[in-house]
């Protein structure tokens, strides 16, 4: 198992985007069950304040990320224009997607009460949201990306403050049902 763990770390280290557990298992020539078990252990070991690199798990995808507590020093080091602060409207839209996603553009606009086209475009360009076709809604929906989890400084959306309460808010449910 130690050799498999080393392979998982090596692949996560060189991966430039999140990997599905299935894809990671294929890459390291291991079973999905063994990879999941090792990832659970590795997450407990790595995701502590003393480690500079954490493992982010978003749904079935995993990725090495910088410790959220090190964000300021990493941002200063990389000095990337896309790391500039988000505007208040962008943070609002991103928060809506975080707590209520996946959502259509129309649903986000209904909650915010204003047109969000440019804001959504900006969030997509920054890689903070991802867009996919939804077979049920028959239109694109936006979901939180792994980069957004890093932005919020959490490892899973369920770690966001008051997630359970806001994810199932009755007033918002009524508003979205009326669309």
Image (spheres, rainbow, N blue to C red):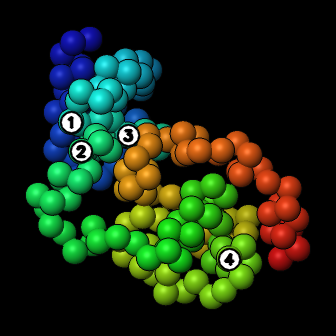
Identify the residue at the far top of this view. Answer: 1
Q: Which residue is mark 1?
A: 52
Looking at marks 4 and 1 on the same chain, the residue that comes earlier in the sequence is marked by 1
Whole-angstrom CA distance, mark 1 to mark 3, is 13 Å
The residue to which callout 4 is attached is 112
Rendered residue at 63%/55% (across/down): 99
Label annotation for residue 127: none
The residue that mark 3 highlights is 56
Which residue occupies the foreground of this view, 36 or 82?
A: 82
| Mark 2–mark 4 distance (CA, rounded to whole Å) | 32 Å
Q: How far across and how far down the image is residue 12, in percent?
A: 24, 38
Q: Label 4: how many residues lie within 10 Å, few (<14), some (14-19) or many (20+)? A: some
**Residue assigned mark 2:** 70
Q: What is the x, y in percent for residue 16? A: 23, 53
Foreground of the two, 72 or 157:
72
Which of marks 3 and 4 precedes in the sequence? 3
C-beta proximity under 8 Å, tags 1 and 3? no
Q: At numbered mark 2, what does the secondary structure look like: helix, strand or loop? A: helix
Q: CA distance from mark 2 to mark 1?
A: 7 Å
Q: Is residue 113 visible?
A: yes
Res 105 → quadrant: bottom right
- Badge 1: how crowded within 10 Å, few (<14), some, or many (20+)? some
Q: What separation in Å lies between label 4 and label 1 (alpha carbons)? A: 36 Å
Closest to the camera, between mark 2 and mark 3, is 2
**For residue 77, side relative to residue 81 (left or right):** left
């Amino acid at each position: 198992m130690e050799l498999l763990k080393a392979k998982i770390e090596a692949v996560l280290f060189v991966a430039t985007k999140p990997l599905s557990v299935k894809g990671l298992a294929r890459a390291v020539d291991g079973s999905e069950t063994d990879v999941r078990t090792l990832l659970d252990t590795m997450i407990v070991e790595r995701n502590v304040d003393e480690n500079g690199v954490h493992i982010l798990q978003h749904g079935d995808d995993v990725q090495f990320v910088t410790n959220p507590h090190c964000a300021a020093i990493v941002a200063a080091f990389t000095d990337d224009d896309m790391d500039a602060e988000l505007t208040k409207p962008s943070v609002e839209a991103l928060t809506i997607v975080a707590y209520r996603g996946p959502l259509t553009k129309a649903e986000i606009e209904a909650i915010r009460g204003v047109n969000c086209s440019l804001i959504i475009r900006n969030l997509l360009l920054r890689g903070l949201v991802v867009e996919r076709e939804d077979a049920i809604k028959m239109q694109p929906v936006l979901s939180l990306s792994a980069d957004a989890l890093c932005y919020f400084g959490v490892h899973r959306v369920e770690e966001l403050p008051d997630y359970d309460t806001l994810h199932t808010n009755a007033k918002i449910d009524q508003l979205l049902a009326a669309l």
